[in-house]
Amino acid sequence: MVKKLALIIIFMIATSYIYADTWIDGTPNLYEESQYLLQRIGWQGRPNMAPAIEGISREPIYKIGDLKKFYAVDMRNNSQYILDATCYAVNDILYVFVEKGNPIAFDRLNSLIDSFGKTYDKVTALLGPPIDNIDNDPRIYILLMDIKDGAPANGVRMLGYFSPLDQFKNTQLVPWTRKRSNEVDLLYIDTISLDLKNITIESVLAHELTHLIQWGNDPEEYLWVNEGIAVYIESYIGYSVKDRISAYEKNPNISLLDWKGNIENYGADYLFFAYISEKYGGPESISAIVKNKNQSTRGIELALAELGRSVSFNKIFSDWVIANYLDNPDIYDGKYGYSTLNIKLSPSATESQYPIDKKFSSVLPWSAQYIEFKKEQDQILKLTLYDNDQDDIKAQLIKIDNSGNTEVSSIELNKAQSETVSIPQENNRIIFVVTSQPNPPEVKKNASSYGYSAESQVYTIAEVSNKKSLITTWGNIKQ
């Protein structure tokens, strides 16, 4: 029995990704409930508090040493509990409370307060300040605590969260849920993040601050947008997000829009907004998306249009999946690469033996598969792509010649939902880039099916004895 258990554990380790130097956000765990409450209570019924007057400091409610009870969420079972915390710091923009039994060093606390002030200034300069709809106090509460998240098998810790529940008054919540609101602008941060070597508590705070600001602007925004932009802000402030990028490079077969809460989801969604920032107006484009009152793909299109960058989401996505594979900003006016990032994706499949009978595969909505065909210099390939789902499959072709020159083109499927392309001998790398792009984009659906086949012919140059010229032909020389 022990031997069998050991084998199972070894198999799990061998088939799973271990992420000891990364973290996840707990906010998505609370998203479904927050949307339920929005539908029942209505965002128009939110507390109508006066916004804080810029440049004027109100007297703080708490002073150092004060005790306060907080509602917190046990992420293992989504239940709520009450904890006691002590006020460790107060200034014009924050209160810092520390859970009893989790003391922290004052030198680290002072460093945290100083760095959060700089983070706050930079984030709010781009996205605007948090909209104070709840307590008429411009200060943000930071609660340093032990977040109850269990012990994930892949080594990932939950280091912070923002709870939309705290943006409602308890009088509003009573008819709809047993949970209660703290009725303040509150960021929950795990104290362990103070001591981690490869993760900074400052990046966690930047991420959760972004969620607070996002909620005030558009509480109905989709998870994939919220999380992608929150990671973007981490990077914008200057903190490393390579852990998320690396996770996506290892497992790119995920949907951009279908949030699953995995590390690779953070990586994909971050890269998409980093791409928008690079190609469509810089950080101001991200600010416009946050402030736009429309959601998901439509919100992105309208926000960019307001900046004079009218472009369809499908167009951005189609260019982005090519950029992720080629990452070459020196071609096609820079749209197929990143100027500030280094991305390396492996092919979804590699083919080098021909002919290939019709092979079938599938691609998730708003994801990409990269089928790379390799050939010898004297080979000409005929590749055929088949769309088994009629509408969703979109494909592009990358051709790279012996000198490294790259050509990217769209594959237009005919009425029979197939298309054959010929690859001349000068191209030694060919990649089918196959995506599923449902309409409307947010529709929930399974993976789309497609297929491909290939045949090879050898290009020969032979000298015919009774002629002085060289003849180019397919196969054998005619007699």
Image (spheres, helix red, strand yellow):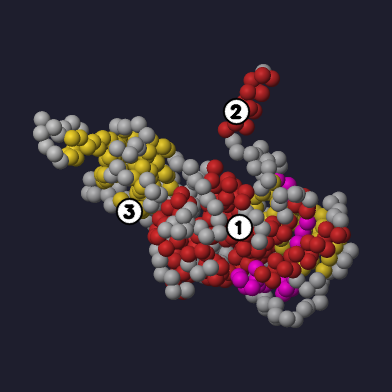
Amino acid at circle 1: Val
Q: Viewer-proximal residue, 282 or 289?
A: 282
Q: Viewer-proximal residue, 252 or 37?
A: 252
**Distance in Å between CA atoms under marks 3 and 2:** 41 Å
Amino acid at circle 3: Ser
Q: Is residue 209 magenta?
A: no
Q: Residue tagged by mark 3?
A: 410
Q: Residue tagged by mark 1?
A: 231
Q: Earlier in the sequence, mark 2 or mark 1?
A: 2
Q: Residue at x 72, y 55 (%)?
A: 200
- Please report the bounds of the magenta region as a residue range: 123-149
Q: Residue at x 28, y 52 (%)?
A: 412
Q: Quarter-wise, where is residue 149 in the image? A: top right
C-beta proximity under 8 Å, tags 3 and 2: no
C-beta proximity under 8 Å, tags 1 and 3: no
Q: Residue tagged by mark 2?
A: 11
Amino acid at circle 2: Phe
Q: Is residue 454 left or right of residue 328?
A: left
Q: Secondary structure at mark 3?
A: strand
Give coordinates of residue 276: x percent, y percent: 49, 63
Of the 4 image quadrants, the one containing the N terminus is top right
C-beta proximity under 8 Å, tags 2 and 1: no
**Distance in Å between CA atoms under marks 1 and 3:** 31 Å
Q: Is residue 472 left or right of residue 366?
A: left
Give coordinates of residue 230: x percent, y percent: 61, 60
Q: Secondary structure at mark 2?
A: helix
Neighbours of disc 2 within 10 Å: few (<14), some (14-19), many (20+): few
Give coordinates of residue 402: x percent, y percent: 37, 45
Q: Earlier in the sequence, mark 1 or mark 3?
A: 1
Q: Residue at x 40, y 63 (%)?
A: 312
Give coordinates of residue 40: x percent, y percent: 56, 62
